[in-house]
Amino acid sequence: MSADFKDAGSGVRAGDQQRHWVATALGIVLVLLAAAVIVMGVMVTMPSEGGVVNDLQTRLGLIAEEGAEEAAMSPWQVLVAAVIVAALFVLLARGMWALQNWARTGVILMLILLGIYFGLNVVFGAAAEIFGGEQVVGLGAILQIALKGLFRVAATGAIPIAIIYVLITLGPRFEETPGQRAFIDRGIRYILVATALSSIFIVFLIILFTAARSWEAIRDVGLDTMLLGTVWRPGSIIGTEDAQLGLVPMIIGSILSTFGAALIGVPLSIMTATLLAEVAPQLVREIVRPAVELLAGIPSVVYGLFGMVVLAPLIRRFEVPGNSGFGLLNASIILAVMIIPTVTNIAEDALRAVPKRYKEGSLALGATHWQTIWSVMLPAARSGLIAAVILGIGRALGETMALIMVIGNAIAIPKPLTDNPLTLFLVPARTLTGNIAVEINYAAGAHRSALFFTGVLLFLMILLVNSLARFLMKERSV
Amino acid sequence: MYRKRNQILAGILVLALMLTTISGCGSSATQEPEPMEEPAATDAPAEPEPATGLSGQIQIAGSTTVQPLAEVLGESFMGMNPDLVIEIQGGGSSVGVTSAGEGTVDIGNASRSVKGSEFEQFPNLQVFPIAYDGIAIVTHPGTELPSLSVEHVRAIFGGEITNFLEVGGPDAPITVVSREEGSGTRAAFEELVMEGDEMVPITENALLQQSNGQVRTTVASTPNTIGYLSFGFLDDSTRGVPIDGVEPSVANVKNGSYPIFRPLNMLTNGAPNELARAFLDYILSDAGQEIVAEDYITVK
Amino acid sequence: MSGAQVTSSVAEIQNKSVVAGMAVGSVARRKLSQRIAFGFTWLAGFLAVAALVWIVGYVVVQGVQVINLEFLTTRPAGGVSGEGGMSTTIVTTLYLVVLTIVIATPLGVGAAIFLVEYAGEVQRESRLMAYLIKIARIGVEVLAGVPSIIFGLFGFALFVVALELGFSLLSAGLSGACLILPVIIRTSEEALLAVPRSYREGSLALGATKWQTTVGVVLPAAMPGIITGVVLSVGRIIAETAIFWVTLGGSYRLPTSISHAGRSMALHVYMLASETRAFDKAMGTAAILIVTIVVLNLIINYTSRRLAARSMGRGR
């Protein structure tokens, strides 16, 4: 009995079944690496004429280059080193299965660090040597660099390996008395508190820096000029008095593009959400949902590229004078596609959260499925749906790169091109986000400060939007 | 059981330590563990001939007009100094002035002269003209325009003339393409073309681009556009418009018949450092100016 | 009438009017309007998938024509000519991903561990800590909603200018880490919360300390979820442009240290598309980007499915 407890006190096993996943993966990688090292070591120590192996041998110093006195290393050294390195890897792999508690954590951590270190070594070395010089990669060159890196790591791995050794042998001993364990616990707790507060610290920093940098504009240019001024001509010269820093065109641009995106995207998303939640069979759901999620992952530059290359010529087909293909319509379409995943996801959740008895009651009364959805479920999910729309709007407001590629970036307040008010969307415009991205590189003085003010404005707008959405979502859970 | 396994492991590890260190010493692989090394900058005395064997880094940023020229000159200079890295970024002439003045880069590029207010802010700025460059008025290849006068150009970019028909072209509404305000090309264009009796501001409906490259891309792929480009960016993708009957070409700037051109400057804060000095000497040498002469006008 | 009878008859009346409203019109007509309405939902779903297929398909089809081994291993030749390949951008993106993950993961996982495991008792111990913890949670929510250009602006103001790190991998990595921190905290929190209490209780009963329990029992069990969060963040970093546009600089050369500038793949697409007319190369780079994201998404799906199966199959 006491023997059991003594064993147990020196470490906690998570259950024999629960193989540490990462450990397994790393273990397999290490075993494979060990095999590769052995193979390369053997290959390299064999005498050969010409070819990649000969090249490798010269590089490793096994064969004397012309003019050198003698080889820097003997084949035996290489073979022994290869065997040692391989054995190391195998042992570490095995060790990870067997070792427990924080020693294991340490081992894994060290291995990850070693892996990153080794990877960086190889990659930096390979990249600098290969890409710095010639244009095309040769397989032999890669092998050579990898081998060099491996040996470099083995030689300099002495220190991490020593640390691991210390961890392995001393680990269990350090946790024997309750006092020591409590000490570790308290120390860890302080560290963790620091990491937890890091998020709020970063927010604080962000607010501090952007607000501080925007103070100059607020003081010199004035809130009223910036928020109500309709002309944006900052003047490229430092500290010019002629600078006109009115943000109204950009505010209108942001609002209009978001509105257009919502107009196209929200009905589409809600109907898709209805499809996913109520109408579609399992098979279709399996296709549509991953597709919608994938839309969320596509980089915004790709959307922008698509808008530039495909949508712009298509939009130019509208025979309206002044239609260049770049403008609010292009931006709205792109943005609509970008917000589909956000809105669909939350709307679907909202629909699924409607209590079953509403639906069942309505169907029992004789309503059709669609009538149920329309008259009962959608109203019941109302707050969730509104939250979804609001989050989508927040996403649209924050989008930058895709928009600057398709919206034209003109500083004018958008006005319809002809009598038809719809042509408003064919006009180029500029958003608040685009303004920042495009001008921050060269802005100076009050101009730069005004851009920071734009950042603060955006931050507040999105904060408001997100808080509203979160409030509505919490209210929904009744 | 624990202890025994640990001891075996420890023993083998110590053995491994010893042997790998031995083989590490003997191998030709370097001992340097640092994957991130910076090549040390060495001092090179200024020579009348282009310096060779320099090592280090030169950071250059600024005008997108000067950028391709600087890149070609840089490649050539780096060819003579394999351990030297010259990094060139864009951003516009204002970036060039500011970063040179603030010291964020070694050399700043500007495609215009430095303004008085900028000298006030950065009193130690030194200006090195390296070339002259013309500004061409370009349209989409599908738009055929006869020669334009400077007044016409001013009216078009000012938003007064809104259809190509009014200046002898096809019946199509004009889409103006211009640059961001930090652009030296734009500043030079405004000074040379838009300044009539008074400064006519460029129309606010213009599509604003961040570099010469972007202007070229937009004008080349969007019908019914007109914009202005540095000579160095002229190619078949856009159509250059003659001004007062004069084609935009290097020869015409040299003989004085093409009116729109400006200096290309490289700026440093105070005296340039060793590497920058060497590079500037190279650019102003015959070899460097030969490269300049390919697409631009030399300073001599 | 009794209260119950009143209630039920009121309900009856309400139901009747609802039913009356619903039952207006023949069944056939209602079925027709249902078919039309459902038709619209099918159309919507179809459009969403079609948009994906069109965009991804177009870019990949156009891009694949440019991709070959040479394209992947040659470096871009100059900022304005559009020639060359994209090799340095791939490597730079890799550096960036590693850097941001290395910075953000310890912070994020640590924060999650604290919020899940330790926050309870710390809250009870001190009012100040309870207040700070509440603010920390709000902080995570706020961070999650900040648009990326603000992170770029902040990174520019703090890292590039104030700390004088300049346009470099370091500035970009630090800014990017701020972006993914909330993602990692959230997913790690979820993963940690999903570990059954019995694990912790069993371990503590055996005499392990809280930290030993956390590291030896809870963390391994939550590992797949945490890894999912990390992979998610990797996907975001690869797709991100705005932040790196203002902190990384645009140099096409290979950065040889973390204080060098560089260009990520997404930035390269932007530069190619706008500065040069090499739309084909831009499509090629974009295609590589998309393929990478798709692969990452598949990995995430696979691991989260495995995670769900595991926790269901355990039945402890």
Image (tube, coloured by chain):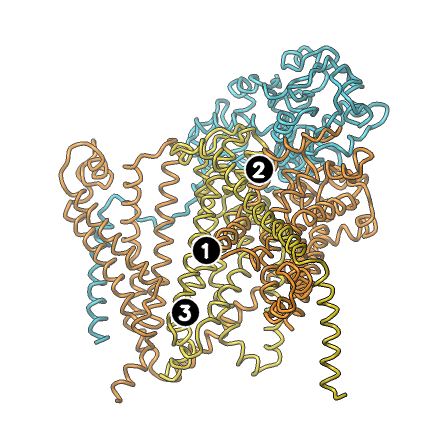
| A472 lies left or right of B71 | right
- x, y percent for residue A166: 30, 69
**Are the numbered discs 2 and 1 placed on the same chain, yes or no?**
no
Q: Which residue is mark 2?
A: A305
Q: Chain letter for yellow? A: C
Give SS at disc 2: helix
Looking at the image, is A437 positioned above or below residue A177?
A: above
| A423 lies left or right of A314 | right
Quadrant of the drawing holding the N terminus of chain B = bottom left
Q: Which residue is mark 3?
A: C311
**Mark 2–mark 1 distance (CA, rounded to whole Å):** 25 Å
Q: Colour of chain B?
A: cyan
**Dot 1, crowdedness within 10 Å: few (<14), some or many (≥20)?**
some
- Tag 2: residue type? Leu
Give SS at disc 1: helix
| C67 lies left or right of C46 | left
| A67 lies left or right of B197 | left
